[in-house]
């Protein structure tokens, strides 16, 4: 059995050079063989069964939290745990949704949002900073401008005598796995009465070269059969080759375009992204490009399918017209709310309370199935592999 401490046989440089599937196996250690999640670091670590578990548990937590007794039950699950929110890069939604997700489960949070207030400014190594956090906290949620820092933090902790879970809240231009989880959840909710995600066409538009949300989402979409992805970006800002290669290896159909409006009528979902100019060098690369063509405006709505899902990881700029907000196809504010619930489910699995929540839900269903909120549908394929006998309230907002 692979164990967390097996990371000790590698230096960081040796570990970083390992194939991703091998490094993921080492980082998850014995938890992977128990069907658990220890660290959440990249999209590649998830399989379809785990996505299904998160989807079901997210819906269950949302339903349970609607009552005072249910909210109290959830808040008492992890009251004995503490989390460090280490955000060395700016964030509003991800920070707040992780904070409120922790609140739902009773986790107490402390944050560092300015590295100038930590001992790193005195020259302390990143590894020592992370190990200090593990002395006081049971979870570390971190966002950093460096692409490999979440993995390096997880490796350092696995090599120590006090490993704790690391959850990647955004790593440079590379990965944003928890955003991808909530995006998949939003897509599944949007299409649950229209055949699910399978076979759908997803149009991703904007600065895809540096947009970590689109990168992670693309890799999770590869787990759904029949998916087609259209990548639409200005010259020089298209999806990077490593993601395209990943999609080819997984048999995903995709196309690359330097136009946008030509494709909107073909899309079942449109995933808009902003200019990632925080990654610009001093030459102001982004300001030299015209993004006008890669904007979705109110007058374009007539071109879209009647049940198209319009999404955006936010924050937005001019690429998404605020006048679209009132259109029922606009899902991005719901997408934003879904982040809190999805991250609560992820923390619940990481904190090993998934079974407790499932048992509470089963008891609740036996007591309240006559209300119509919980219905018995033994053949509902949407709930495999967990809770096949339960269908959750489809009217959750």
Image: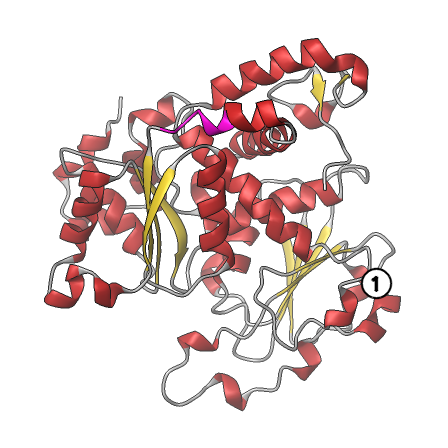
Residue 129 located within the stretch drawn in magenta? no
Using the rendered view, name the quadrant where residue 58 is placed. Answer: top right
Mark 1, secondary structure of its residue? loop
Callout 1: 10 Å neighbours few (<14), some, many (20+)? Answer: many
In the displayed structure image, the side of residue 230 where residue 125 appears, left or right: left
Which residue is outermost to the left? 123
Residue 109: % across, % down: 36, 44
Q: Can you say whether 57 is above or below 370 in the image?
A: below
Give the residue at x 58% y 40%.
Answer: 223
In the displayed structure image, the side of residue 343 where residue 141 appears, left or right: left
Residue 12: % across, % down: 17, 50
Residue 210: % across, % down: 47, 69
- Tell me if residue 111 can be seen: yes
In the displayed structure image, the side of residue 284 where residue 141 appears, left or right: left
Using the rendered view, name the quadrant where residue 373 is placed. Answer: top right
In front of the other: 240 or 278: 278
Give the residue at x 74% y 48%.
Answer: 200
Q: Name the residue under label 1.
A: 304
Secondary structure character of the magenta stretch overall: loop
Q: Can you say whether 278 is above or below 104 in the image?
A: below
In front of the other: 312 or 35: 312
Please give the range of residues in magenta. 74-79
In the displayed structure image, the side of residue 301 where residue 51 appears, left or right: left
Colouring of the image:
secondary structure
Q: Can you say whether 100 is above or below 275 in the image?
A: above
């Amino acid at each position: 059995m692979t164990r967390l401490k097996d990371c000790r046989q590698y230096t960081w440089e040796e570990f970083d050079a390992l194939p991703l599937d091998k490094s993921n196996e080492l980082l998850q250690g014995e938890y992977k063989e128990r069907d658990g999640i220890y660290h959440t670091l990249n999209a590649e670590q998830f399989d379809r069964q785990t996505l299904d578990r998160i989807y079901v548990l997210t819906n269950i937590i949302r339903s349970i939290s609607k009552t005072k007794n249910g909210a109290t039950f959830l808040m008492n699950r992890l009251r004995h745990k503490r989390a460090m929110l280490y955000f060395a890069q700016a964030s509003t939604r991800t920070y707040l949704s992780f904070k409120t997700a922790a609140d739902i489960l009773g986790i107490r949070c402390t944050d560092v949002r300015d590295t100038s207030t930590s001992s790193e400014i005195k020259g302390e190594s990143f590894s020592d900073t992370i190990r200090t956090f593990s002395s006081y906290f049971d979870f570390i949620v971190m966002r950093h401008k460096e692409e490999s820092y979440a993995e390096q933090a997880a490796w350092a902790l696995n090599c120590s005598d006090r490993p704790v879970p690391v959850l990647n809240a955004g790593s440079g231009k590379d990965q944003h796995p928890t955003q991808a989880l909530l995006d998949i959840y939003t897509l599944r909710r949007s299409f649950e009465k229209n055949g699910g995600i399978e076979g759908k066409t997803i149009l991703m538009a904007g600065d895809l070269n540096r947009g970590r949300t689109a990168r992670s989402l693309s890799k999770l979409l590869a787990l759904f059969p029949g998916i087609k992805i259209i990548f639409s970006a200005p010259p020089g800002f298209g999806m990077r080759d490593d993601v395209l290669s990943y999609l080819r290896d997984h048999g995903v159909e995709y196309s690359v375009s330097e136009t946008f409006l030509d494709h909107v009528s073909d899309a079942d979902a449109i995933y808009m992204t902003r200019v990632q100019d925080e990654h610009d060098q001093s030459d102001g690369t982004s300001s030299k490009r015209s993004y006008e063509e890669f904007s979705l405006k109110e007058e374009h709505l007539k071109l879209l399918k009647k049940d198209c899902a319009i999404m955006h990881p936010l924050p937005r700029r001019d690429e998404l017209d605020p006048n679209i907000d009132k259109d029922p196809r606009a899902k991005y504010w719901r997408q934003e709310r879904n982040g809190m619930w999805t991250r609560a489910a992820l923390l619940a699995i990481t904190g090993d309370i998934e079974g407790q929540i499932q048992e509470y839900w089963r008891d609740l269903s036996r007591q309240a199935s006559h209300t119509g909120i919980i219905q018995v549908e033994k053949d509902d394929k949407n709930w495999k592999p967990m809770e096949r006998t339960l269908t959750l309230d489809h009217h959750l907002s």
